[in-house]
Amino acid sequence: MALRQGVRGFSIDVELEIWRAIQATVRRTPEPLPAKAGAPAPEDVLAGAADAAYRVALRRGFRGAFLDLELGLWDAVHAGR
């Protein structure tokens, strides 16, 4: 999704940076995540993951519109529930 919005950089580099940012965000989550596979993540964890991906895009720069990027990342994170 980020690449479709024109986030600058090689696709693998962008993907790895986004995953690392999401991983760091999840690690900072104070409450335990659902232990059962397939259990939905709390909304604040999903919001943090979308925000982490958005911050990577902002650092790298992108060609698309801010709102399209932010909403697209939000949708992508929620689709993976």
Image (cartoon, rainbow, N blue to C red):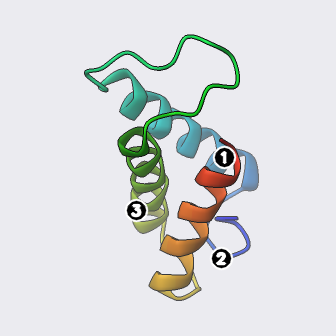
Residue type beneath disc 3: Arg
Disc 2 versus disc 1: distance between alpha carbons?
13 Å
Residue 63's tag is none
Q: Is residue 15 above or below residue 39?
A: below
Quadrant where the N terminus sits is bottom right
Q: Label 1 to label 3, Cα distance in Å?
A: 14 Å
Q: Decide if residue 20 is on the left or right side of residue 76.
A: left
Q: Which residue is mark 1?
A: 15
The tag earlier along the polypeptide, 1 or 3, is 1
User: Quick one: SS at disc 1?
Assistant: helix
Please tell me which residue is depicted at 58% across the width and 37% down the height of the picture.
Answer: 19
Helix, strand or loop under label 3: helix
Q: Residue at x 65, y 77 (%)?
A: 5
Q: CA distance from mark 2 to mark 3?
A: 13 Å
Residue 81 image position (x, y, % from top left) = 65, 41
The circle on residue 59 is 3
Q: Position of residue 64 (x, y in %)?
A: 58, 86
**Residue 43 location in percent, x, y?**
42, 45
* Amino acid type at image mark 1: Glu
Front position in the image: 4 or 14 = 4
The mark found on residue 6 in the picture is: 2
Residue closer to the observer: 55 or 50: 50
